[in-house]
Amino acid sequence: MSAEGVPRRRRLGALAVVAATVLALIVTENVLAAAYLNRIERFSTDFSSTFLLRRIQALKASGPQVVFMGDSSLWGYGLPPGSNAVAILAAEGCPCANLAFKAGSPPNYYALALLLQAAGYRPKLVVLEINQPAFNPADQGYATLHPGLETVARPLLDPADWAALGLSTAPSSLRGEADRWLSSLWLVYGARADLRASILGDTDVVPKEPPPADAFLGTYDLAPLDERNTGVHYLEKTADLLRRQGIPAVAFFTPTNHALLHEYIDVPEYASNGRYIAHLLEQRGVAVIDLDRAFPAADFIDNTHLTKQGQRRLAAVLARRIPALGVAQVSALPLHEASSP
């Protein structure tokens, strides 16, 4: 062998050692990260598509469960992860999975239902949270998908959905393709937002003073609802998709702080829109539980976000009204319970 060949072989050998070491580190990190991700109790604010797909895979592996879809109210705004109603029900023995996240809305429910279908997963029951602000064109989730959900749901949506939800038809960039490739190979990279939120915390700071009523001016759009409303359209599509699959569904109206919002929502238009939503769901075989006025003002942080006591009350009411949850009662419910809805 020539003198020049020896250094070249040494360099190649060193590179092989480096590559093997990096691969071993990635494999080790993937194993550790997978174990850690499985312990995360709820979606982070900026959850990744990697985390979402792992959660769906875990659901499929666990068998039929009761799947909850909702927004920040059911997610547990301002509270530790284990304090929301779904976590409480799960602790009492319910086979519950919480797919609620902060920007949850009917378009996101539909995209989630499509993903479950594509994964071949059939829930035992789907519980939908219905919050009237989601039908307001000014709401964050009115006609948009969460980025972590959009990334994986895009191929399942038809052209009409792309147009309605403002999805870009621009070709994938090299950077985007590299990001997807790295996410599929390196779990720590793919689930970085979820790991960061779990380690550093992802709970909103509750204001020291309750917000005034005018802080929610514009949150509720009282224009009459019809099928031109994007929220209505995707709520219908979600219910129709579940019915075609033979998956039973229940919907509940988010408990709302009428004492705070009295001057804005205690009007005929608000009640009429609620009846409209309930009717379109019931027409599609979805049972509706109206909890809109069921809770006292003391159970709220603000307009719809519940305190720990409020979340426990919500868990108790849902356990009582939905026998499929398999929970006879929720333990240690505070004694000053509101009148039964």
Image (spheres, rainbow, N blue to C red):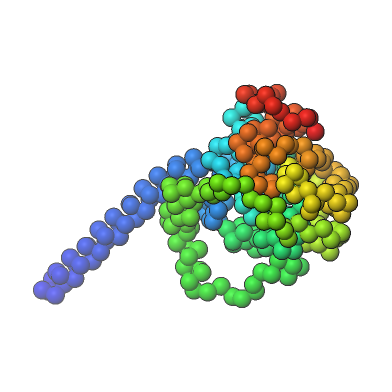
Residue furthest out toward the left: 3
Where does the N terminus fall, quadrant-wise?
Answer: bottom left
Please provide percent x and percent y for residue 231.
77, 58
The residue shown at (10%, 73%) is 3
Q: In which quarter of the image is residue 269?
A: bottom right
Frontmost residue, 143 versus 312: 312
Q: Is residue 121 left or right of residue 20?
A: right
Residue in the image at 33% along x and 52% along y: 25
Q: In this view, does 11 lie to the left or right of 171?
A: left
Residue 159 in picture, x, y percent from top left? 73, 69
In depth, the one of 249 and 313 nearer the eye is 313
Tell which of 341 and 104 is nearer to you: 341
From the viewer's perspective, is residue 175 above or below residue 57? below
Residue at position x 84%, y 64% in the image: 228
Q: Where is residue 87 in the image (x, y as percent from the top left)?
A: 60, 36
Can residue 119 be seen here? The reply is no
Give coordinates of residue 114: x percent, y percent: 70, 54
